[in-house]
Image (cartoon, rainbow, N blue to C red):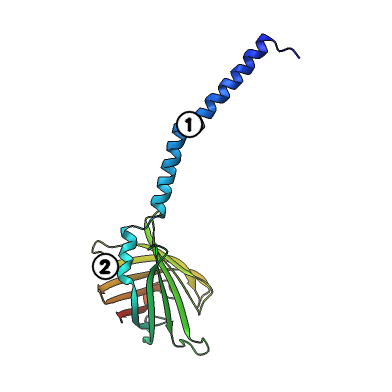
Amino acid sequence: MKISCKNSLVILGIIAATAFITVQFSGPSATAAQDDDMGQMMALASPGAHHEYLKQWEGNWKLTTKWRMSADMPWDETPMKASSKLAMGGRYLIENVSGPEVFPGSGPFEGKSIMGYDNFKKRYFSLWIDSMSTAPMTEYGQIDESGKVLTTEGENLDAMSGKLVQTKSVATIVDEDTRKIQMFGPNEKGEMFQSMEIVYTRQ
């Protein structure tokens, strides 16, 4: 089959254009873009000072746990214990909590929290699960200027009403051997009240 001079020029033009596109998308600029993407990915994946902050919460703790169902009820108190340790290269603080039966028939209490700092969202987070619920509790927040108070908020299940409600937790470092967590939720009128307080004493 004969190829005309005109067709030959068209074919050469397509080859040249293809070569140009290949260079544009696989040459030095593409490599630089890939390096930038990899650098960003590594930065988002790497633990930093915010994660190091959680190291002071490592250890074995005795817990004094107080809770109530409404602001006008007296506090009930349950002793518990916790073990906390940074895991996965210092990215997450994993805490295991155990204690006696809280309600008749509920069995021994078991809970676990995972805390960390999301480099992408630039916020601390906490995730809590326990043996008395099938719904995890998640909250996000920031540390105050003193570096001692972490306040997190979220939307979580209220088991009494069966609805999602706003929740808030305030974790305060009292000293190197003591910290405190106060938890808040709404009453039947939607007014926030303190529903729980946990004092951690290092063992």
Out of 191 and 17, give the one closest to the viewer. Answer: 17
Residue at 50% x, 33% y: name it: 26
Q: Position of residue 97 (x, y in %)?
A: 42, 79
Mark closer to the chain start, 1 or 2: 1
Residue at 51% x, 75% y: name it: 161
Which amino acid lies under the numbered mark 2 shown in the image of this protein? Lys
In which quadrant is the C terminus drawn? bottom left
Q: Position of residue 141 (x, y in %)?
A: 36, 62
Residue 186 seen by the camera = no
- Which of the 4 quarters of the picture holds residue 126? bottom left
Q: Which residue is mark 2?
A: 148
Q: Residue furthest bottom?
A: 104
Image height check: is 176 above or below 39? below
Q: Tag 1, which secondary structure? A: loop
Query: Going by the image, does 89 lie left or right of 201?
Result: right
Query: Going by the image, does 132 lie left or right of 174?
Result: right
Query: Going by the image, does 23 lie left or right of 192?
Result: right
Estimate how packed mark 1 is, as few (under 14), some (14 to 19) or many (20 or more) residues with alpha carbons within 10 Å.
few
Residue at 32% x, 79% y: name it: 200
- Which of the 4 quarters of the picture holds residue 125? bottom left
Which amino acid lies under the numbered mark 1 shown in the image of this protein? Gly
Image height check: is 40 above or below 176? above
Q: Position of residue 140 (x, y in %)?
A: 40, 62
Q: Tag 2, which secondary structure? A: loop
Tally of marks: 2
Residue at 45% x, 40% y: name it: 34
Q: Which residue is mark 1?
A: 27
Q: Position of residue 180 (x, y in %)?
A: 31, 76
- Report how far apart the C-alphas of labels 1 and 2 lie in the structure: 50 Å
Out of 96 and 182, give the one closest to the viewer. Answer: 96
Residue 157 seen by the camera = yes
